[in-house]
Amino acid sequence: MEKLSRSASGARHVRWAREILGTLRAHHQVNELLSTDQKNALSAEIGKLEPRIQALVGSVGPYRDFVEHAHVDVRARQRVANYLCDEAQRAADGALRPHRKEIDSILPGGYAAILSKTTLSRVLRAGHEKTVEFADRAASMLRSLPAKVPGTAPLADALDKAAGMLRGFNEQAVGLEAQRQPLRSAMTKAIFELREELDQMDGRLRSHFSPMFIDSLYPELARKGAAVADDADEDDDTSAPPEG
């Protein structure tokens, strides 16, 4: 019997467990081959599985809400602030490049020191934390240039402003991660308890049913065991990737 991958998302586990619960109920309701003892055994398992599913639903909802709202919002803001840092650095590079020789003669390390001697293409792919570092350094270096190099103050101000914005969003992201962990832990615990219940269910049912019957309770899986196969709805959103 193939069981859902442990790395599958909470939503996929809910879908999987509901399919199993639905099959238990269907056997109980329409399978005329069952004895009274077998029906009673299924009733007992239905009663045990239902609260496990409800517990998982109760933990998946808050976690997905968090990921799909607060987490998405701060990541979007980071991307925008990162873009603004990139634009400020492009603007500084474009405005100062005509004065490169003059800056080379004034600034220790020359013009390249403004971006820590890193090519602009690499600076623009640096990532959130490194982008703040590059923008801060560029702003500081620009402020150290003498007044005879024109336009450095507004260029430095733009870099400082964008870097400050991104720094703030990076700090928010760290704070949100601290909020995310207990929500994810609660969901992980509920998944573990659900799977434990199903393993125990299989063991209990072996005294009443054949392995083939027990196997019939579990839905067919797709995506290498990571999702319930569903010919009727290929766009079912419970096929989302694992969370976290």
Image (cartoon, rainbow, N blue to C red):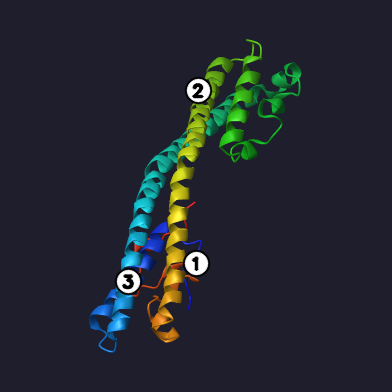
Question: Is 219 located above or below residue 149 in the figure?
Answer: below
Cα gap from disc 2 to disc 3, whole angstroms: 63 Å
Q: Nearer the viewer, mark 1 or mark 2?
A: 1
Residue 84: in sight, yes or no? no
Q: Residues within 10 Å of mark 2 (few under 14, many from 20)?
A: some
Amino acid type of the residue tagged 3 in the rendering: Ala
- Which of the marked residues, 1 or 2, is nearer the chain's N terminus? 1
Amino acid type of the residue tagged 2 in the rendering: Lys
Q: How many marks?
A: 3
Cα gap from disc 1 to disc 2, whole angstroms: 46 Å
The answer to whether mark 1 and mark 3 are in CB contact below 8 A is: no
Residue under label 1: 5
What label sits on residue 158 in the rendered view?
A: none
Q: Residue 185 at what x, y percent from top left? A: 48, 49
Residue 20: in sight, yes or no? yes
- Which of the marked residues, 2 or 3, is nearer the chain's N terminus? 3
In the image, 218 versus 84, the foreground residue is 218
Q: Residue at x 56, y 36 (%)?
A: 128
Q: Residue 38 at what x, y percent from top left? A: 32, 82
Cα gap from disc 1 to disc 3, whole angstroms: 26 Å
What label sits on residue 44 in the rendered view?
A: 3
Question: Is 195 located above or below residue 219 in the figure?
Answer: above
Amino acid type of the residue tagged 1 in the rendering: Ser
Residue under label 2: 161
